Image (spheres, helix red, strand yellow):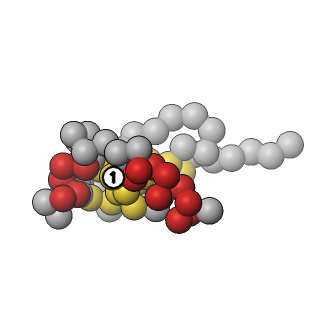
């Protein structure tokens, strides 16, 4: 299924970024990938590395420097 998806999206003009990420050639993710400048964090791919990520809502995961914190999940 992955190969079929990759082949189909590439045939439609998308570039395979990695895992389940695709972008058009002029997209901000495709350009740094071609230059070897794309960064990866726990949420996916990014054009900038080392950015703090503040997330809100149930089970959100935050990253500040090298510290990761996930909001408390309560099950009833």
Q: Residue 54 at x, y = what percent?
A: 39, 40
Residue at x 25%, y 45% (from the top left corner): 25
Q: Is residue 75 left or right of residue 46?
A: right
Residue at x 39%, y 61% (from the top left corner): 18
In the image as oriented, which residue stretches furthest toward the left? 35
Q: Is residue 73 visible?
A: yes
Q: Is residue 68 visible?
A: no
In the image as oriented, which residue stretches furthest toward the front? 11
Q: Residue 72 at x, y = what percent?
A: 63, 47
Residue at x 36%, y 47% (from the top left corner): 14
Q: How many marks?
A: 1
In the image as oriented, which residue stretches furthest toward the top? 57
Instruction: Name the quadrant of the N terminus.
Output: bottom right
Q: Is residue 26 left or right of residue 71?
A: left
Q: Is residue 56 left or right of residue 49?
A: right
Q: Nearer the viewer, residue 40 or 3?
A: 3
The residue wearing badge 1 is 15
Q: Would you identify the image quadrant in which residue 4 lies?
A: bottom right
Sort mark 1 into few (<14), some (14-19) or many (20+) by Cα contacts within 10 Å.
many
Q: Nearer the viewer, residue 66 or 30?
A: 30
Q: Residue 71 at x, y = what percent?
A: 57, 45
Circle 1 sits in a helix, a strand or a loop, which is it? strand
Residue at x 31%, y 42% (from the top left corner): 24
Q: Nearer the viewer, residue 39 or 62?
A: 39
Q: Would you identify the image quadrant in which residue 36 lies?
A: bottom left
Instruction: Name the quadrant of the C terminus.
Output: top right
């Amino acid at each position: 299924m992955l190969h079929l998806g990759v082949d189909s999206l590439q045939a439609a003009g998308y570039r395979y970024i990695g895992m389940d990420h695709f972008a058009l050639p002029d997209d901000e993710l495709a350009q740094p990938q071609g230059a070897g400048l794309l960064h990866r964090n726990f949420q996916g791919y990014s054009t900038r590395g080392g950015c703090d990520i503040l997330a809100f809502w149930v089970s959100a995961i935050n990253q500040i420097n090298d510290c990761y914190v996930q909001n408390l999940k309560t099950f009833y």
